[in-house]
Amino acid sequence: MDDQTLFDQAEPALDIFDEIWQPVAWWAERGPDVSAVHEMGETWGFARLDREVRAFADFFQGLGVVAGDRVLFLAENGFALATGVLACSRIGAWVIPLNARLTALEVDKIRSHASPRVIVFTTRVSPDAKLHSSRLGARHDPALSVLGATVLVDQEVRDPEPNEPEPQNRVAAMLYTTGTTGDPKGVMLTNGNLLFNAARSSATRKVRPGDRAYGVLPLTHVYGLAAVYLGTLYRGGGVDMVARFDPNAASLALAKEGVTIFMGVPAMYQRLLERAEMRGEPLAAPNLRYTSIGGAPVDLDLKRRIETVTGIPLINGYGLTETSPTVCVA
């Protein structure tokens, strides 16, 4: 069965899921071999992603993690973070994704505030996570070898938060953001918050199996987590897990790796244009069908230049962490 036929027969309705791990399990039954996530040349279909999510959830439970506990990830985009976000949801734990490029002082302050039971370091894809792992004394565990991560069980942890009876009302993620103050504060987002955004983002982009989103926006940020990652998986699309933005790698992916969806911040689009201009060659993106921009004010000239190069509209989105995140798109 090709991707189009599969989608026509299996398109999920809006609002049919209660927890953020469920869309992956749903697609694992209907399109097990459809591409779900990619990391450094390796691809997992939905069935493989679902198996790894279940295994990671079992691993956490073996460490004593229960519903209402916090699990902190010092991470950059890759299989470990992509899997861990969903694994935490399966057992009712709160995932706290932190950018591994934060300083030791910043990490320690948030760790003290969040009181996680477990900390995971995505050492394979992030040199900075590896440094934090060494500094804090994390250990390697054979169960995490496929994910390229290390783990630390925190001995000084508060009791779990009370578990909400309704799954959609349970906190799925706590994202730290400076927002209106200089000090990061934890924004608690429920399954319902994230699924509502994922469903609408997916529908707006008309995502379907066979789509490939360039996932360079960090999953440690709500834009990357809710819109790019969860929103693409919701309707059976696949996501490239890219740890850091590089205009050369992004240009290659757009030109030759079948990327159909690119969502970025203004600086990324600017660097793509600058690279093309410096090389005296067009920005090639033969499969690209959807682009969006957000995270910072958008210059009208930049928008026009991108639309001229790609031949498709550059959709401008506005949102904030507290609204998980999208408020409007235009």
Image (cartoon, helix red, strand yellow):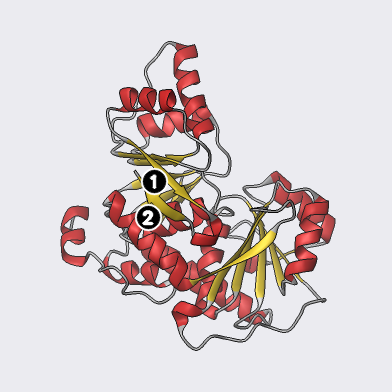
Instruction: Find the distance from the CA under tag 1 to the CA under tag 2.
Output: 7 Å
- Please state which amino acid type lies under the numbered disc 2: Thr
Number of marks present in the image shown: 2
Compared across the picture, whether 73 is left or right of 249 comes to right
Q: Which residue ends up furthest to the bottom in the rendered image? A: 165
Q: Which residue carries the number 2 mark? A: 232
Closest to the observer, 44 or 215: 215
Residue 152 in picture, x, y percent from top left: 75, 67
Local crowd at mark 1 within 10 Å, few (<14), some, or many (≥20)? many
Q: Which residue ends up furthest to the front in the rendered image? A: 180
Q: Which of the 4 image quarters holds residue 31? A: bottom left
Find out whether the residues at labels 1 and 2 contact each other: C-beta distance under 8 Å. Answer: yes
Secondary structure beneath dot 1 equals strand
Closest to the observer, 205 or 39: 205
- Up-down relation of residue 328 to residue 68 (above or below): above
Look at the image and tell me in which quarter the C terminus lies. Answer: top left
Q: Which mark identifies residue 213?
A: 1
User: What's the residue at 43%, 51% (across, down)?
Assistant: 228
Compared across the picture, whether 184 is left or right of 207 comes to right
User: What's the residue at 84%, 55% (across, down)?
Assistant: 135
